């Protein structure tokens, strides 16, 4: 356990987000999962009108993963790229590794997703499916799902 804590601290101090130079071994998988969970929270936590609160998660994604994530925001950004609503994600448990093969880690995180636009608020119980890959390892795919389907980014009503 002490080894994992030291590794987690070393990873978080030495590089932003999920960056890591070597593929995960069974002994550091816990550290990668913990960093992935933090990255998911960072990605799903942004403030209406605050572009930087959305962009601060970009380094946690692969180029393709970020492009896919930003497609989710189509129609919900102003002309300067700032979100037209706020969102926050709170995990309700630890991430669960679904599979790990060929350099790809698939995991799932359950939690509460709150969306706010002006005075309107909506709260969902969600499962966020995440796929990690690359060197350094980063988010390749992130998809919040509720009731078996993806959460569409809509203004809360």
Image: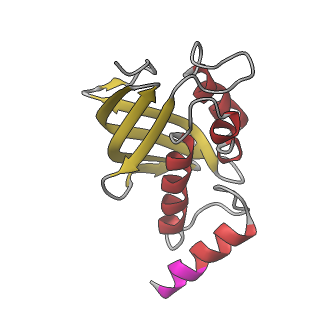
Q: Residue furthest bottom?
A: 2
Q: Give the vertical position of 62 relative to 137 (above or below).
A: above
Quarter of the image that includes the C terminus: top left
Whether 4 is among the magenta residues is yes
Q: Residue at the spot x=33%, y=28% of the render? A: 122
Direction from residue 93 to residue 78 in the image, left or right: right
Write down the quadrant of residue 116 in the picture.
top left
Q: Residue at the spot x=59%, y=50% of the render? A: 103
The tally of labels here is 0
Direction from residue 149 to residue 106 in the image, left or right: right
Of the pair 40 and 122, the residue shown nearer to us: 122
Q: Residue at the spot x=38%, y=22% of the render? A: 156
Direction from residue 78 to residue 109 in the image, left or right: left
Q: Residue at the spot x=75%, y=22% of the render? A: 80
Task: Tell me the magenta residue range.
Answer: 2-6
Magenta stretch, overall SS: helix
Q: Position of residue 58 (x, y in %)?
A: 69, 41
Whether 113 is among the magenta residues is no
Q: Residue furthest top?
A: 75
Q: Position of residue 120 (x, y in %)?
A: 37, 24
Q: Residue furthest left?
A: 147
Quarter of the image that includes the N terminus: bottom left
Of the pair 42 and 14, the residue shown nearer to us: 42
Q: Position of residue 48 (x, y in %)?
A: 57, 30
Write down the quadrant of residue 127 in the picture.
top left
Q: Position of residue 31 (x, y in %)?
A: 53, 67
Task: Indicate how the structure is coloured in the image.
Answer: secondary structure
Q: Give the vertical position of 151 relative to 87 (above or below).
A: above
Q: Residue furthest front?
A: 119
């Amino acid at each position: 356990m002490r080894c994992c804590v030291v590794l987690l601290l070393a990873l978080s101090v030495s590089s932003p987000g999920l960056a890591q130079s070597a593929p995960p071994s069974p002994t550091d998988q816990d550290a990668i999962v913990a960093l992935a969970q933090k990255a998911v929270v960072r990605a799903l936590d942004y403030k209406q009108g605050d572009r930087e609160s959305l962009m601060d998660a970009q380094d946690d994604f692969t180029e393709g993963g970020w492009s896919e994530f930003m497609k989710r925001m189509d129609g919900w950004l102003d002309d300067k790229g700032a979100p037209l609503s706020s969102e926050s994600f709170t995990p309700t448990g630890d991430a669960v590794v679904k599979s790990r093969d060929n350099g790809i880690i698939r995991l799932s995180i359950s939690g509460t997703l709150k969306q706010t636009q002006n005075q309107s608020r909506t709260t969902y119980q969600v499962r966020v499916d995440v796929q990690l890959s690359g060197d350094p390892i980063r988010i390749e795919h992130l998809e919040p799902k509720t009731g078996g389907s993806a959460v569409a980014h809509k203004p809360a009503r």
